[in-house]
Image (cartoon, grey):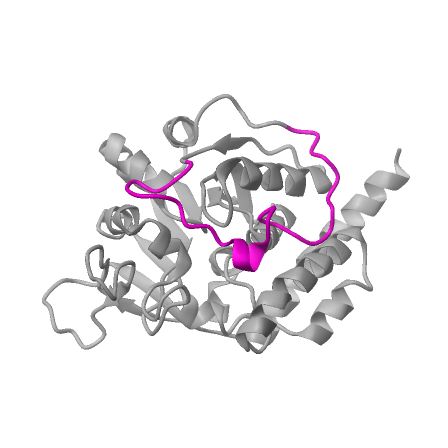
Amino acid sequence: MPTPIIIDCDPGHDDAIAILLAIANSEKLDLRGITTVGGNQILDKITENALKVISFVNADIPVAKGAAGPLFGKLVTGEEAHGESGMDGPLLPPSKFRPVEQGAVEFMLNIIRSSEEKITLVPMAPLTNIALLITAYPEIKDRIEKISLMGGGISYGNVTSTAEFNIYVDPEAARIVFESGIPITMSGLDVTDKAAIFEDEILALKERGPVSTMVGELLDFYSIYGKKMGYVGSALHDPCAVAWLLHPELFEFEHLYVTVETEGKLTRGMTVADRRKKTDRPANVQVLVGVDREAFMRLIFDSLEKLDQELLLAAEGK
């Protein structure tokens, strides 16, 4: 039986690929819905991006708009990496779908309450929506199987020297989630930077079908920022949170106690991991630290090829 999941996202180039990865593997993942939160761009833009992605592959998945900004303070966006639209690059057709009327918290709550199975949450954005859900309805935590999130890093950051973007945007929300008691698997920079796609692979994508080509064109834009920063390849951050649910054997991990710094002048947004067991607090996070990059990339390519074939068959059937 496929694992029922909700994706919480802020598309975002890598978010788009993560959504497609989940859709392509419906025999293993039952994507019950998508929620959006202000992050890589403002809420309206990233919600429209999510709708365009699912519309491109004819996947009628409900999308609910969530928090426009963090619990405290102003929204910091990822425009430098993701562009003015939040998903610059190819011009995707307008979406056939619109968001549901419910807000993200009520939407997630209803799915979790009505499900016979426990739900796995897959946040790949600031954790505002998840924090609001479990704060308003703490009893719902027992109905959440686990959280597979993209965020943080136990070695370094990418917005500051110590903080990764998703955690930095709303560290108070992140701390609530990390200290919630819900089982967490963290795909942070320690693993996602190792899940990089290289230029020759991007070129290969663009020689395949319509979905692969669209993703390749997204990555053309996404790689501009990486080249500017001197990175080797473009890290596919968010797909790691989905790939772990599909093939956990691809990853190496450590069980650690992790919390989030909310006050430090130099360390606000840092995911602080007790790697040397300096506290008596038990491990609360499975931290992914390594990945079989070649196998991970095969999973991405094979999944996109499956969507290519489905889209072409649908076009022939018209």
In the displayed structure, 73 sits above or below 260; it is above
Q: Residue 251 in the image: state x and y as whole percent.
A: 46, 70
Camera-side residue: 174 or 226?
226
Judged from this view, the residue extending furthest toward the left is 280
In the displayed structure, 55 sits above or below 303; it is above
Q: Residue 71 in the image: state x and y as whole percent.
A: 30, 40
Camera-side residue: 214 or 60?
214
Judged from this view, the residue extending furthest toward the top is 101
In the displayed structure, 160 sits above or below 179; it is below
The residue positioned 75% from the left and 64% from the top of the image is: 205
For residue 223, which quarter of the picture? bottom right
Using residue 44 as the reference point, say whether residue 127 is left or right of it.
Answer: left
Using residue 126 as the reference point, say whether residue 1 is left or right of it.
Answer: right
Which residues fall within the magenta stretch? 68-97
Q: Residue 240 in the image: state x and y as whole percent.
A: 50, 61
Q: Residue 257 in the image: state x and y as whole percent.
A: 22, 64
Magenta segment includes 90 = yes
Magenta segment includes 10 = no
Q: Is residue 177 visible?
A: yes
